[in-house]
Amino acid sequence: MIDKILLFPYWLTLRLRKLCYDKGWKKSSEAEVPTISVGNITVGGTGKTPHTEMILRLLLESDRWGYSNIAVLSRGYKRTSKGFQKVPWDAASADLYGDEPVQIAGKLPIVTVAVDKDRVEGCRFLCHPDELETSRKARRCLDKTIPRADIIVLDDAFQYRKLRPKVNIVLVDYNRPLHKDKLLPLGRLRDLPERAGDADILIVTKCPSYLDEWEKGKWAETLGVRSYSPVTCKGRSDSGREQTLLFTTVDYKPMAPVFEEADSRFTYAKRLILFTGIAKDNVLRSYLSDSYKIIRRFSFPDHHRFTGRDLRALGKAIKASPTALICTTEKDAARLKGNPKTTLEIKKRLFQVPIEVRFLTPEEKEIFVSTLLGAL
């Protein structure tokens, strides 16, 4: 009861905001080109970046969008730059642009990646890049040579209701159901759980490799997807919106060096130091524990900017276990690459674990592709 009393002001604010946009009292606009929003209702940990990468690859593989100019627009959380910025594929540091945009740009250099806190403005610049030369709002833009976007994927834009996407994709962590969570700061919900009903496509992420139809049906029930069919993966929200509910899992790929100085022989070690700044590292720990003994674990908050003190502590751990491998995530690697405090001893031992997401069945993937492309 006490949590409901404490959270009431936040709940009321979110409720009023939702009402204002749903009733049209607050205006929202659409971009000139099709947009796909990839977002969530909780703070971090649902896998937005690997799902964004998956969507980009599917677009590149499609006949309709494979030869088009595809762009990604992100806020660029915790970046030091201002205004609209194009993210170079070989960005030396994540500080300027944010770790996730740098990761996406590095893995998919054919895609235009940009950051702008104002998503409406960012979409306008992506649709009219010539305005970057004349607009005062773009005077701080470091690289103004970008192609005109034909389609834009919006990273983490579900709460940015000033911009209305063509397709809303919402991710939910299998290990943290919305109905068992609480609003910030007592839980990890940053939005009302019932806003899942505003999604066109709901994806339950980080699932076990197999779920039976009964469990999928229970998930549909808790997310408010009525008349859900595990065969068609379709159902309807309380408002009557047709929704597609799908399930993905994480595939870990072979370790890759973060720096050129890395010595591949460390990957054969049996002892590992885990160094991460993500929302939750439990799934990664479980995976690594099958092959390595994790002797030290450095766990920082999501998007943590690694300090000299953090890296000195890591250096001490290396001295205590000089043959141990250091493992991190792709997102953390993006921040470590441009950190001048990263010593040679760390670089030699530092490896990242790339991840990709996949649907639990080939049929679900086909349904996702047809639903997504059919809505654009």
Image (cartoon, grey):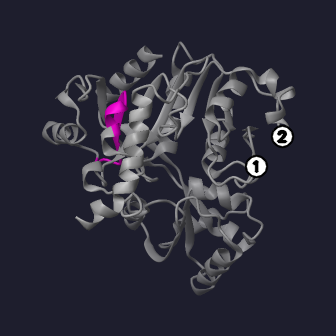
Residue lying furthest front: 25
Residue 142 numbered mark, or none: 2
Q: Is residue 368 left or right of residue 92?
A: left
- Residue 62, above or below 204: above
At 50% from the left and 30% from the top, the residue drawn is 26
Picture quadrant where residue 105 is located: top right
Where residue 202 appears, as percent x and y from the top left, is 34, 34
Work out whether mark 1 precedes mark 2 in sequence or the reverse, and give the earlier one. 1
At 65% from the left and 41% from the top, the residue drawn is 117
Picture quadrant where residue 241 is located: top left
- Residue 349, above or below 62: below
- Where is mark 1, residue-wise? 81
Which region is colored magenta? Answer: 195-208
Mark 2 belongs to which amino acid?
A: Leu
Mark 1 belongs to which amino acid?
A: Ser
- Asked whether the residues under the numbered discs 1 and 2 touch, taking CB atoms below 8 Å apart as contact, a structural biologist would say yes
Where residue 307 appears, as percent x and y from the top left, is 68, 71
Q: Name the foreground residue: 14 vs 115.
A: 14
